[in-house]
Structure formats: structure tokens, C-alpha cells
């Protein structure tokens, strides 16, 4: 009887590490490219007028 090594578990671990590395690389790349985009600041000042009737004085 010949003994054989079962190495399928090491292949699973290696493929999992490679997949996790790719996902992390994609997330870091997306973060890097989003930080390079210069989003314009709003030019119009937003102002909301709140009527005095909504305020209640608490003592």
C-alpha cells in the first residue's frame, strides 16, 4: 500500500490568501483614486430660517 499526501487543504488556504489580497488591493486602489478626485465645494450658501414658534423655553 502506497501512502499519499493530501495537500488540498494547503491549496485552499493559499487561494483564500490570494483572494483576500486581491480584495484588499482593490479597496486600497479605489480609496487612492477617490482621494485624487477634486470635488467642487458648493458655491451657494444654504440657509434655513426657523420660525420662533418651534422653540420652547425649558427651565
Image (spheres, rainbow, N blue to C red):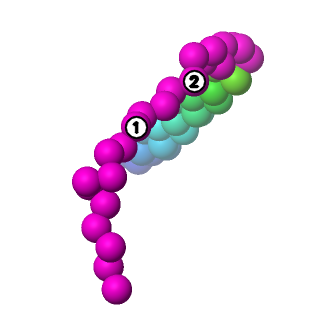
Q: Which of 6/24 is in front?
A: 24
Overall secondary structure of the magenta stretch?
loop
Q: Position of residue 34 (x, y in %)?
A: 64, 19
Q: Is residue 28 found left or right of 57 in the rendered image?
A: right
Front of the two marks 2 and 1 = 1
Residue at point 40%, 37% (across, down): 49
Q: CA distance from mark 2 to mark 1?
A: 13 Å
Q: Quadrant of residue 37?
A: top right
Q: Position of residue 12 (x, y in %)?
A: 43, 38
Residue at point 52%, 35% (across, down): 20
Q: Looking at the image, is 10 positioned above or below residue 52? A: above
Q: Which of 19/30 is in front?
A: 30
The residue under label 1 is 49
Q: Is residue 31 visible?
A: yes
Marks counted in the figure total: 2
Dot 2: few (<14), some (14–19), or many (≥20) neighbours within 10 Å?
few
Residue at point 26%, 55% (across, down): 54
Q: Looking at the image, is 6 positioned above or below residue 30? A: below
Q: Which of 52/29 is in front?
A: 52
Is 39 a magenta residue?
yes
**Quadrant where the C terminus lies?**
bottom left
The residue under label 2 is 45
Magenta stretch?
36-59
Say which element carries label 1. loop
Q: Looking at the image, is 22 positioned above or below residue 55? A: above
Q: Is residue 15 found left or right of 24 in the rendered image?
A: left
Amino acid at each position: 500500500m502506497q501512502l499519499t499526501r493530501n495537500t488540498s487543504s494547503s491549496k485552499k488556504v493559499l487561494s483564500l490568501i490570494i483572494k483576500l489580497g486581491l480584495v484588499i488591493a482593490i479597496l486600497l486602489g479605489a480609496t487612492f483614486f477617490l482621494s485624487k478626485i477634486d470635488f467642487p465645494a458648493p458655491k451657494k450658501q444654504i440657509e434655513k430660517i426657523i420660525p420662533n414658534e418651534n422653540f420652547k423655553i425649558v427651565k
